[in-house]
Amino acid sequence: MSKAAIQGFSADNFTCAVIGAGGLGCNIAVHLAGAGIKRLILCDFDKVSRANLNRQFLYTNEDIGIKKVFAAEKRLKAYAPETDISALDIKLSENNIPEELKGCDMIFFAADNKKARECISDFCTKNKIPLMLGGIDGFYGKTYLYIPDETPSPKEAGMLDKRKPSANISAAAGVIGSLQTAIGIQYLLTKDNTLGGRLTVFDKDSFSTLEIKQRKRKRDDKA
């Protein structure tokens, strides 16, 4: 029996992917595994560095120089042996998206690479896969759940804007990564579309939520 089932709900039929195994990704992966999901796919291409250790708690000094996905896979398997966890050492691009992602019930995006955000957004639109996005910058962070055919796109929500974080604070990564997972799991369990289309912003010590409206498109008079 999964941990989640013991706590009163079951998430053990779901397959999720986490894109990025940094500060946000570590939080998301741990909480998904703790919820007892059936399968967890980790995607990243970077190696652990000393600068990561203040906020990426799945890693220790012994992991420096090791690929993040393999170090994370090892610890998550020890934490949640009932979850099928796989690591993909891959740099995502338009022409390099693993076939395994097509079988996901939800994809969690947790990296600061704009091109990867764009190609995953397009991939989820094409394959009708819900996409939970997040980002942090210092004590600022935001989340957005995109549900294809139901909510405004990540671009319309401002989630594809190019912005290089000035700093990465462990506490902010914990807040936003946990929020991404909480909303994502709730949607998987309830299929409540009202959870999507809302941009949640965390700024230092307060939250605000904005409902994103679909852009009005001009009618084609020739149509």
Image (spheres, rainbow, N blue to C red):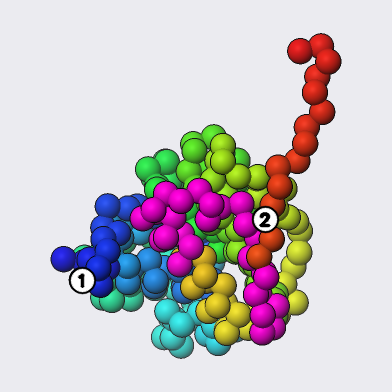
Magenta stretch in the rendered image: 182-208
Task: Locate residue 203, reporting x and y percent.
Answer: 70, 78
Would you say residue 10 sits in the magenta stretch?
no
> Residue at (80%, 19%) from the top-left corner?
220
Q: Is residue 33 left or right of residue 94?
A: left
Q: Is residue 150 above or below residue 171?
A: above
Residue at the farthest top position: 222
Residue 2 pos. (x, y %): 21, 66
Quadrant assignment, res 38: bottom left
* Residue for badge 1: 6
Is residue 14 shown to the viewer in this render?
Answer: yes
> Furthest-left residue in view?
1
Residue 33 falls left or right of residue 121: left
Callout 1 amino acid: Ile
Q: Secondary structure at mark 1?
A: helix
Picture coordinates of residue 100, whole percent (x, y): 39, 45
Badge number at residue 76: none
Which quadrant of the view contains residue 63?
A: bottom left
Residue where numbered disc 2 is placed: 211
Position of residue 160 measured from the top left corner of the image (x, y, whole percent) = 70, 53
Identify the amino acid type marked 2. Glu
Indicate the quadrant containing the N terminus: top left, top right, bottom left or bottom right.
bottom left
Q: Is residue 204 magenta?
A: yes
- Real-space Cα separation, disc 1 to disc 2, in angstroms: 34 Å
